[in-house]
Every structure is written in C-alpha cells, then in structure tokens.
Image (cartoon, grey):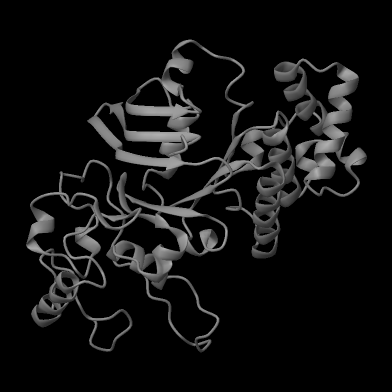
C-alpha cells in the first residue's frame, strides 16, 4: 500500500512577465517528498532552485505565472493561496532564507520577533510567547539565550542570526522546513554547525526538509534524495547513494568534479565547469547544458532530452548518459574532433595544449 507523500509537485512551471517578453524560470519540475525525509535540490545560481521554493511558499511576485500542481498533505497549495489562508505558511510549511538580515526586523529585539510568531499563529499570551521564545533559542543552541532575547539583530554574529531565523521557522512546529542556501554567508566551521543543527532538529521533530544548495557535497550524508536542476529543468533525480555512486547526467558529474577531495594532493587543480549558466532568454527548447557539456551530441541541439528512468526512482535527462555506451561514444567522438558540436574545446582545463 503506497503512502501519500507530504509534498507533491507535478510539472511545475514558473514564468515571469517582463518588458522583454516572458521568461521561463522553472520548466516541468516534479518531485515527491515523504514525511520525515530530506530532499536536496542542487544547482548553480539561476538554475531555478529558489524560484521552485518560493512557488511552494507562495512568495512569488504578482508578475509570476505558476503552472502545474503543488499539494501538501493532500491539500492544493494554490487553492490555499487563492483563499488567502493565513495559518498555513509559517505554521505547517516554513522557510529559512539565505541572508538572515533580510529575514529579521532590524528595529525589533530578537525576543519580540520570535514571540510575535507564537502570538499571531498559535494565539499564545504575551507571557507564554516570551517563555516559548526563550525555549526556542535554547533548542537551537544559542548561548545565554535570555540575554539574546533583549538584543537586536545587528548585535549578533552571522551564525547566531541564522540560528534565530531557524528558531522562528520552527516556532509553530512545522511539518516541512525549506532551507534555501542557509549557510551562504557563513564561514566553513559555522556552516557545518548550522547544517548539523538542521539535521538534528529534523530528526528530533520528525520533520521533512528541502535543503537547497549549489554545493553537491553538502547534501551527501544529509539528504535522502537529490534533484539536480539546471536552466529551470530537472537534469537528474535519485536517492543520494545512487546519485553519487552511479550518476548519469554530465552536469551532475561536472558538479562532483568541482568538489575538493581530501584524498588528492594539495596542489591538485579543481576542475571548473566551462562556460556559464544560460540566461533564461537563451533557452530555446534544446538541452540547456549542451554548450558546456563534453558529451554533447547533435541530438542535444535539436530538442530537449526527456527524463528517462535508469532504475527505480533514478531519472536523468540526457541523450548520452554517463556510464553508458552512448555516453562513452559521444565523449570519444568529441575527443577525436577536438570540440563538441557547440564548439566547446575538449582539451582538459589547465592543460598546456589549452588555447
């Protein structure tokens, strides 16, 4: 007997109306997230990660057009938005943003901001809300929480501010937390502490989480499943172990190659992804990664590859998948030609032959 997912997104499309015409930022994204599980959404800036999250959170601007369906615990999220449901977002479904300073009111004390969530959504009294705010700061590991309640956001470090934002997001006991690049502005040590905190809180509360990041290494060991986005489309989707052990999309492979490895010599050069991500006005119904892909074929320039299943729950959108005969042949043909069909050089980065 199948269990209904907590969050289900089907064929999500987001188009922004601009003076230069419509811009398709998300195109046909679908996924399910079960209760108590973590989904990692990975991709470079501009891949559609944050737009997808904001569509789920009903935070897109008025000039955005949303297509497809989003259901949460069997309820139509877009219908809830149309009905102006007040106690859904921020209560059952919450989000932690990249920069905590844009989430916190600079002229309100920390305690007031957390207590306000409890009063507005849960109907707590001022005294009960203040006590709840103190308890939440303790839960997210903030030292001397009673002192922090009386402070303003600018008096806290970046790591402490992010912990405050997490406390606010958890105030009403959500079933799903979306963390959008929650460690972007933090140093490496603090990043680990914040990610560990989110992991611990998710387990303790039996909560689901969507973890959005540009770093594929962040989701390893933290997410149950991973979806890789590029140009607003799903490039690959699988459980985490499968994605790292048997990736099929060249973009996933390229992201993995950019991660520093502890078992390589210190002088080893990282392998960057050539070129740049496309602007959404450059997407023309072909494979968006083709101009940067060393496995590109002529077929990639004629149409966008569909998502193909390689095994249970493992999908990729590629005509020449990594680890297949087709992928090896495409790479060999391009190597022999010296360039891909889009003109990308096949000379390895950093090689003395590189022009």
Placement of 289 over or under 164, stated as above or below: below
Left or right side of 13 for 36: right
Percent coordinates x, y for residue 92 in the rendering: 61, 28
Residue at 11% across / 49% down in the picture?
Answer: 303
Question: From this viewpoint, which residue is outermost toward the top?
Answer: 83
Percent coordinates x, y for residue 141 in the rendering: 81, 49
Left or right side of 172 for 291: left
Residue at 44% across / 39% down in the picture?
Answer: 1
Q: Is residue 106 visible?
A: yes
Q: Nearer the viewer, residue 254 or 266?
A: 254
Placement of 88 over or under 36, stated as above or below: above
Percent coordinates x, y for residue 319 in the rendering: 16, 60
Residue at 29% across / 67% down in the picture?
Answer: 274
**Which image quadrant for residue 116?**
top right
Left or right side of 281 for 204: right
Tell me the quadrant of the picture where the C terminus can be found.
Answer: bottom left
Q: Nearer the viewer, residue 226 or 285?
A: 226
Percent coordinates x, y for residue 200 in the rendering: 70, 52
Q: Is residue 151 visible?
A: no
Q: Nearer the viewer, residue 59 or 38?
A: 38
Question: From this viewpoint, which residue is outermost toward the front?
Answer: 1
Picture mark count = 0
Residue at 77% across / 18% down in the picture?
Answer: 119
């Amino acid at each position: 007997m199948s269990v209904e997912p907590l969050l289900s997104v089907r064929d999500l499309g987001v188009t922004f109306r601009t003076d230069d015409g419509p811009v398709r930022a998300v195109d046909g994204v679908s996924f399910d997230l079960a209760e108590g599980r973590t989904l990692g959404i990975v991709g470079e800036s501009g891949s559609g990660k944050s737009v997808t999250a904001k569509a789920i959170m009903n935070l897109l601007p008025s000039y955005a057009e949303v297509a497809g369906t989003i259901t949460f615990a069997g309820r139509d999220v877009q219908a809830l938005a149309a009905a102006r449901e007040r106690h859904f977002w921020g209560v059952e479904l919450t989000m932690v943003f990249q920069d905590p300073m844009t989430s916190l009111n600079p002229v309100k004390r920390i305690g007031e901001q957390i207590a306000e969530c409890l009063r507005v959504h849960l109907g707590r009294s001022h005294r009960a809300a203040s006590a709840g705010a103190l308890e939440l700061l303790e839960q997210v590991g903030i030292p001397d929480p009673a002192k922090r309640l009386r402070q303003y956001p600018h008096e806290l470090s970046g790591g402490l501010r992010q912990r405050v934002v997490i406390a606010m997001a958890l105030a009403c006991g959500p079933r799903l937390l979306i963390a959008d690049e929650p460690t972007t502005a933090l140093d490496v040590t603090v990043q680990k502490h914040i990610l560990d905190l989110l992991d611990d809180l998710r387990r303790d509360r039996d909560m689901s989480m969507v973890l959005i990041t540009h770093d594929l290494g962040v989701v390893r060991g933290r997410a149950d499943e991973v979806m890789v986005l590029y140009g607003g489309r799903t490039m690959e989707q699988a459980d985490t172990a499968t994605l790292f052990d048997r990736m099929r999309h060249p973009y996933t492979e390229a992201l993995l190659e950019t991660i520093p490895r502890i078992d390589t010599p210190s002088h080893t050069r990282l392998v960057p992804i050539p070129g740049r991500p496309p602007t959404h006005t450059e997407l023309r119904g072909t494979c968006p990664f083709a101009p940067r892909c060393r496995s590109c074929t002529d077929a990639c320039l004629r149409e966008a590859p569909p998502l193909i299943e390689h095994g249970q729950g493992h999908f990729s959108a590629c005509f020449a998948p990594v680890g297949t005969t087709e992928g090896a042949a495409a790479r060999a043909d391009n190597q022999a030609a010296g360039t891909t069909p889009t003109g990308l050089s096949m000379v390895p980065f950093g090689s003395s032959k590189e022009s």
